[in-house]
Image (cartoon, coloured by chain):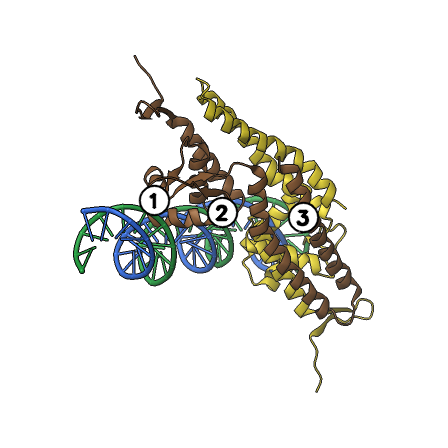
Chain colours: A yellow, B brown, C green, D blue
Amino acid sequence: MFESKETVTDATEKNAAVVNVELELMVRDFFADAVKVLGLPKSVGEIYGSLFISKEPLSLDDLVERLGMSKGSGSQGLKMLRTLGAVSEVEGIEGRKVFYEADVELKSLVGGFIREEIRPHLSSAKVKIGRMEASNLNGDEHYAERINKLDNWRKRSGLLLPILQKILGK
Amino acid sequence: MFESKETVTDATEKNAAVVNVELELMVRDFFADAVKVLGLPKSVGEIYGSLFISKEPLSLDDLVERLGMSKGSGSQGLKMLRTLGAVSEVEGIEGRKVFYEADVELKSLVGGFIREEIRPHLSSAKVKIGRMEASNLNGDEHYAERINKLDNWRKRSGLLLPILQKILGK
DNA sequence: TTATTTGTTCATTTTTATTTGAACAATGTT
DNA sequence: AACATTGTTCAAATAAAAATGAACAAATAA
């Protein structure tokens, strides 16, 4: 008996691509889970995972078809990934349809996540801590100590980010 | 006109505690928001925030009353915080009611989070990546390269954790 | 023993987050 | 022009996560 988990999708002379469907599925699901840790929707992980493992750039329509998701979700997911700098448009492909590929450098992924998701939180934390200090007008010691601790956490987190990028970035 | 944002709750001779209600609310809300970044429920943040800023240890009943949440939520929230090592029972208080206080050392908070939330994910990632390698039996180059990249990310994240603890831990 | 206090568990309800799909805009094609 | 293709937006539907509250257990007090 002949067993195969592989399929030839594009079998023109020039451009034969053997696709391991099983593997591509595993990778897609891997990212679907992974992004949830970061607080992003599953669909975003599925899209990124598909692009990460794909041998070719994919269009919105390709993704929507493969993932069986609505065009709306696909469009929104790609938008989020573009904002994070996790995917980019591939230049020079005929027609007006846009094709995407995954940015696979951890450096830029981490950078994008820090810029879009972490920094804004640290900024708003700074403002809020300022208000706490203002509220402790009479300088109660216990409160002052706690607010100060909080502010130290914030400062240290801020210092951490560049280091994080350095370690994770290539 | 007499304006005050403060209230004396415990005005016995020995143990007068002036409580800044406004400030305590700010801190509670601060943590309610903050924990969402970590993927924990708001109620957990409210509980931790209350304990973090409180001048005294609080019991489950205290928390449930202040936060206007159900006993069920309070119990579950405290359980999670105990598991993370973010709160601890205060020894030597009369009666069978248990009182809690916040662990305010960033070091142990980060440690608990890494142990409970990060490490398990990295472990399961390792297993999954192993399966991906197994699926790429015929050694397709493109796939091998991507799987390898993924595994590098995993390894680097593992290396990062102790560094993270060192920087954030006092 | 019976009642009270304290706390947990978990099925149900409520809230929040995500996805869908139809309407729309923009651009290219016939 | 009329039509087809591609993609976005957003109100509504759906799915997922969290909170509730009643039932229960354990421990103490009366």
- Specify the subunit that label 1 lies on: B
As measured in the structure, the alpha-carbon distance from the residue carrying label 3 to the one carrying label 2 is 25 Å
Say which element carries label 2: loop
Q: Which residue is mark 3?
A: A86
Which amino acid type is shown beneath numbered disc 3? Ala
The label on residue B40 is 2
Q: Which residue is mark 1?
A: B97
Q: Earlier in the sequence, mark 2 or mark 1?
A: 2
Counting from the top left corner in percent of width and height, residue A61 is at 62, 59
Classify mark 2: residues with Cα within 10 Å, few (<14), some (14-19) or many (20+). some
- Specify the subunit that label 3 lies on: A
As measured in the structure, the alpha-carbon distance from the residue carrying label 3 to the one carrying label 1 is 51 Å
Q: Is residue A47 left or right of residue B150?
A: left
Is label 3 on the same chain as label 2?
no
Q: Is residue B33 left or right of residue A44?
A: left
Residue at x 75% of width, y 59% of height: B148
